[in-house]
Amino acid sequence: MQKLKDIINFLETVAPLSLQEGYDNSGLLYGDPESNIEKTIVSLDLTDAVLEEAINIKAQLIIVHHPPVFKPIKRLSHYDQVSRMVIKAIQEHIAIYAIHTNLDNVIWGVNGEIANRLGLKDLMVLSPLSNTHQKLIVYVPALHTEKVRNAVFAAGGGAIGNYSDCSFSSKGIGTFKANEGSNPWTGKIGERNEEAEEKLEFLIPVHLQASILQEVQNSHPYETVAYDIVALNNQFHEIGGGAIGRLNTPMPTELFLKEVKSIFGSAVIRHNGIEKREISKVAICGGAGKSLINNALSKGADAFLTADLSYHDFFVPPFKMLLADFGHFESEQFTSELIISLVKEKFPNFAVLKTAIQTNPVHYFL
């Protein structure tokens, strides 16, 4: 059994809500964060059948990739499918949590799972986001440097790429005068004090700023902590839309398409002409990724795999890049397994199950 808030906090550490797109509606859609969860079901989509399945197995939480509530609901009506599902979930006390474009926008999320299935290496984000990190500068008396540094690391600061516990320090002398009513750690009220200090610098995620600053305050001896937060325009290869990597071994284009079709169970793959005879560098975007076509072209991708492409999207010169639509559901179908593996790793004794319902609304007449 787990508190719903603990599951939510973990998921939002994996994929912070601050990374979702402006049009999205990820997060807790219904439920009491203080409630106890004994069983969870995970699905790409919420449908009437998935909700019935959750009721039958007595699950108290449904985690979905696509938020069922995408637009404001003006009235609840049993004639509207979304309203009907929301009403039933409330009646059955089943919480609903969506983890959508925020999971798309981390390299270990939806696109990382696609890349793993394809065996891509040297993976990087295709369209990095900006303003996702800040620099924290904090001034600490020399004897407390390690305590504060460890507190920042423990709270999630100081990670750069595949490295953790990253910081920089420089030594100096700080001065301050404690005024009446203060409670100085060192020095006398009314007298200027000099203190040997270290200036610590860390890279911190924007969404963790408040919690990291709280840990700095808790571990710092000063009554009032001196710190700076510096905005950064840096882009990071782990945060953003899509992904790009390389196949272990270059592959003939026709064989590559057959592999994609087999791995993802695509009934059909729509693509532009085939003039690229060999595929090595592959760009991917789970779900609707037409906005990243130019990113894939500019980064020299031999192929770009995505979904929901329209007729005019395919006018990409085939000698420049293979553009292939292998299906929205097909591209994201392994997201449920990804979520389950993440939750099970964090809560090994917790019951989290994959839906037995196939929720793909698209069918093909062959």
Image: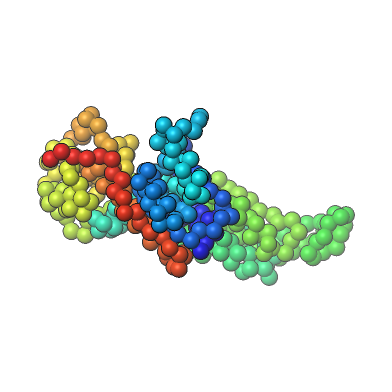
Is the residue 14 above or below the residue 132 in the image? below
User: Looking at the image, can residue 236 be seen?
Assistant: no
Instruction: Specify whether residue 357 is in view.
Output: yes
Frontmost residue, 65 versus 1: 1
Q: What residue is drawn where x is 67% and y is 64%?
A: 219
Residue 295: percent from the left, percent from the top? 31, 40
Q: Name which quarter of the figure residue 299 lies in.
A: top left
**Quadrant assignment, res 323:** top left
Residue 202 drawn at (x, y percent): 55, 57
Image coordinates for residue 162, horizontal then vertical, percent: 42, 61
Name the colouring of the figure: rainbow
Relative vertical location of residue 177 with respect to residue 347 in this rendering, above or below: above
Task: Choose between 65 and 212: the one closer to the eye.
Answer: 65
Residue at 21% in and 30% down: 311
Of the 4 image quadrants, the one containing the C terminus is top left
- The structure residue drawn at horizontal position 40% and vertical position 36%, both measured from the top left corner, is 81
**At 18% across and 42% down in the image, what residue appears?**
269
Image coordinates for residue 217, horizontal then vertical, percent: 68, 59
Residue 194 vertical placement versus 105 (above, below): below
Q: How many badges with numbers are in the image?
A: 0
In the image, 18 versus 86, the foreground residue is: 86
Where residue 41 sits, quadrant-wise, is: bottom left
For residue 313, side relative to residue 90 (left or right): left
